[in-house]
Image: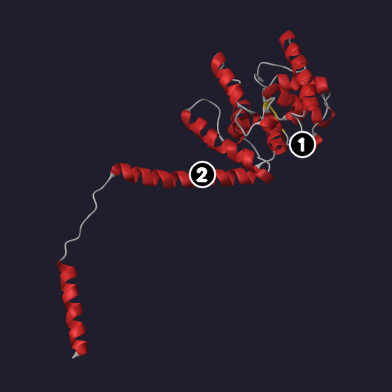
């Protein structure tokens, strides 16, 4: 009797559930976009993180700019050299020229950015860390997408790489003349020496061509380039003395 009563109750519940209409949730496009946008953002961030981790230990074989110039010119001069085989004065010179507060910021130099905006300069606010991200992972040119990706990846690079590693990669991928990439190629092309043998004057001249490498020649400096190199040489000595080079030496 007890078994038949339980079976009857179960059957009644089943009929009641079967008769209940299914309620469909209304489609909310904004909510759907937020949900899938968040998921896509997490995936993109994870991919970026993996790419940053890869080059923490491995050297980038090439960059978008190097590849483009190789295709345009037919060949480029580029050979990797470890930071230990670069004259320390070259490291200090490029920091003095491009990013004097390199040791004191987390990827973005807010004072330099504000100064660049106030002066209306098209260039000058980018740190060495930002330039490394742009050169290694992204592309040249201006776009909101590239700036957004750069803004996300730069703190990742700062968090996961040492300052010396950032500078090492920069000195190996930066364009330092037409078809000349990296300090090893630049040192031999302009002065016929290895990067470990660069003098303070030679290092300053190489650093001086960085903003406009296709139109400046470190071996045949103009009066303007000589003046800039002299300022860079002085700046390199200053950051060595006041501790602003301690993070990469």
Asked whether the viewer can see residue 208, the reply is yes
Of residues 90 and 217, which is closer to you in this image?
Answer: 90
- For image coordinates 76% across by 12% down, the residue present is 226
The colour scheme is secondary structure
Q: Image quarter for residue 116?
A: top right
Q: Image quarter for residue 96?
A: top right
Farthest bottom residue?
1
The numbered dot on residue 120 is none
Of residues 12 and 128, which is closer to you in this image?
Answer: 12
Q: Nearer the viewer, mark 1 or mark 2?
A: 2
Q: Which residue is mark 2?
A: 45
Tell me residue 20's x, y (percent). Answer: 16, 65
Q: Secondary structure at mark 2?
A: helix
Asked whether the viewer can see residue 221, the reply is no
Q: Answer with mark 1 or mark 2, whichever residue precedes in sequence.
A: 2
User: In the figure, 55 relative to 140: above or below?
Assistant: below
Is residue 29 found left or right of 113 in the rendered image? Answer: left
**Residue contact between numbered discs 1 and 2, judged by CB atoms under 8 Å:** no
Tell me residue 171's x, y (percent). Answer: 71, 31
Q: CA distance from mark 1 to mark 2?
A: 29 Å
Q: Secondary structure at mark 1?
A: helix
Is residue 64 found left or right of 242 in the rendered image? Answer: left
Q: Which residue is mark 1?
A: 83
Image quarter in which the C terminus is found: top right
Image quarter in which the N terminus is found: bottom left
Is residue 68 found left or right of 246 in the rendered image? Answer: left
């Amino acid at each position: 009797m007890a078994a038949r009563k339980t079976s009857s109750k179960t059957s009644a519940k089943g009929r009641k559930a079967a008769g209940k209409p299914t309620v469909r949730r209304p489609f909310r496009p904004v909510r759907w976009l937020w949900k899938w946008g968040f998921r896509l953002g997490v995936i993109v961030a994870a991919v970026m993180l993996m790419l940053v981790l890869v080059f923490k230990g491995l050297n980038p074989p090439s960059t978008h700019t190097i590849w483009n110039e190789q295709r345009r010119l037919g060949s480029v001069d580029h050979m990797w050299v470890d930071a230990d085989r670069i004259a320390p004065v070259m490291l200090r010179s490029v920091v003095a020229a491009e990013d004097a507060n390199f040791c004191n910021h987390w990827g973005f130099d807010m004072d330099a950015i504000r100064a660049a905006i106030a002066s209306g300069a098209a260039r000058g606010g980018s740190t060495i860390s930002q330039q490394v991200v742009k050169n290694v992972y992204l592309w040249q040119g201006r776009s909101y997408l590239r700036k957004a990706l750069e803004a996300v990846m730069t703190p990742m690079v700062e968090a996961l790489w040492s300052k010396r590693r950032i500078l090492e990669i920069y000195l190996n991928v930066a364009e330092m003349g037409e078809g000349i990439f990296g300090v090893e190629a630049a040192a031999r092309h302009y002065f016929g020496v290895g990067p470990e043998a660069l003098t303070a004057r030679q290092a300053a001249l190489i650093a001086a061509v960085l903003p406009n490498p296709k139109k400046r020649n470190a071996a045949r400096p103009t009066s303007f380039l000589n003046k800039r190199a002299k300022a860079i040489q002085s700046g390199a000595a200053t950051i060595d003395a006041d501790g602003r080079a301690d993070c990469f030496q």
